[in-house]
């Protein structure tokens, strides 16, 4: 595995750990806010938002929290004015990192992120320094133990899928164009296939990291994702499966 599949694996592992640590709602709120910002606050018209809200409800997240996260993303949260930024930079061994930021105080956020990067083997770069590495795609995940493989393969046969990872032991990762994300998600759901997914930035190439560089990179990405103003983190690393066990 590499690229989006690697990062998806890590985030799913972290999601389980977050639930145990009691911070799952924070991460779900970020996902809801980002989905609402990208595609609007109408759940029926925004598959990314519908899927993460469904996940939030399954996790017993209060409706008030969900509504607040949606209103934050659509800019309808009274008393707050949030601005959106893309921060770009490099991690250990020259790995590209992009962060989607939503903040009400850039003068606070920028120094915070710069400090996290510089103290953990990375550095912020100029706008455009790594954005060319990434392309916006729709990413759909299907847990293998929740679907019959034959049914799944039949379900995607007629869909306009750009790529699919069948090798991951835990889930199928489907990549589609952003324009096909909603229709593909709806078709899979019609076939009673439980999915997760969102519009993501997928790397066009990857950088191999291992050993201490891998450990330092994973720690850096974890710290960035934990920052309250960072909505999403994207990277183009390729890491051996054995190193994924180092994820907390």
Image (cartoon, helix red, strand yellow):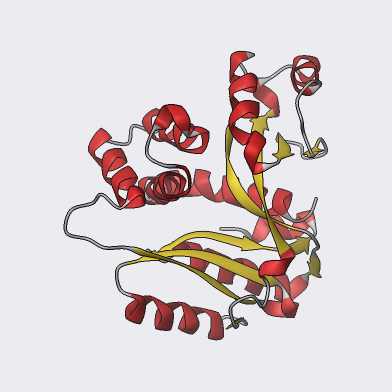
**Number of marks drawn:** 0
Figure quadrant of residue 83: bottom left
Query: Horizontal placement of 195 versus 36: left or right?
Result: right
Query: Horizontal placement of 230 versus 206: left or right?
Result: left
Closer to us: 17 or 182:
182
Rendered view: 103 above or below 9: below
Rendered view: 36 above or below 192: below
Outermost residue to the left: 79
Query: Horizontal placement of 191 versus 133: left or right?
Result: left
Residue at 75% over, 79% down: 93
Outermost residue to the front: 179
Task: Pinpoint residue 225: horizontal percent, then vertical percent.
Answer: 49, 62
Residue at 76% over, 37% down: 169
Rendered view: 111 above or below 206: below
* Quadrant the C terminus occupies: bottom right
Rendered view: 150 above or below 178: above
Task: Pinpoint residue 174: horizontal percent, then vertical percent.
Answer: 72, 36
Residue at 55% over, 86% down: 118
Closer to us: 143 or 202:
202
Task: Pinpoint residue 125: horizontal percent, then vertical percent.
Answer: 60, 82
Task: Pinpoint residue 13: horizontal percent, then vertical percent.
Answer: 59, 47
Residue at 78% over, 59% down: 204
């Amino acid at each position: 595995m590499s690229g989006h599949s690697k990062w998806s694996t890590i985030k799913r592992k972290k999601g389980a750990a977050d639930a145990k640590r009691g911070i799952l709602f924070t991460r779900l709120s970020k996902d809801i806010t980002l989905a609402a910002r990208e595609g609007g606050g109408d759940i029926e018209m925004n598959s990314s938002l519908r899927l993460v809200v469904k996940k939030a409800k399954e996790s017993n997240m209060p409706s008030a929290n969900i509504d607040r996260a949606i209103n934050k993303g659509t800019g309808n949260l009274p008393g707050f004015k949030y601005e959106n930024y893309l921060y770009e930079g490099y991690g250990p061994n020259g790995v590209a990192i992009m962060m989607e930021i939503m903040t009400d105080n850039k003068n606070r956020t920028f120094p915070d992120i710069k400090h996290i990067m510089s103290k953990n083997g990375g550095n912020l770069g100029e706008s455009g320094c790594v954005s060319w590495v990434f392309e916006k795609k729709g990413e759909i995940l299907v847990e293998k133990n929740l679907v019959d493989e034959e049914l799944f393969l039949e379900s995607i046969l007629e869909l306009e899928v750009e790529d699919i990872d069948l090798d991951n032991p835990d889930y199928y990762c489907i990549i589609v164009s952003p324009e096909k994300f909603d229709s593909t998600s709806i078709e899979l759901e019609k076939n009673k296939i439980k999915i997760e997914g969102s519009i993501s930035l997928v790397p066009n190439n990857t950088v191999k990291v291992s050993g201490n560089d891998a450990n330092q990179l994973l720690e850096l990405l974890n710290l960035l994702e934990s920052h309250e103003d960072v909505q999403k983190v994207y990277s183009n690393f390729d890491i051996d499966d054995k190193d994924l066990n180092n994820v907390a």
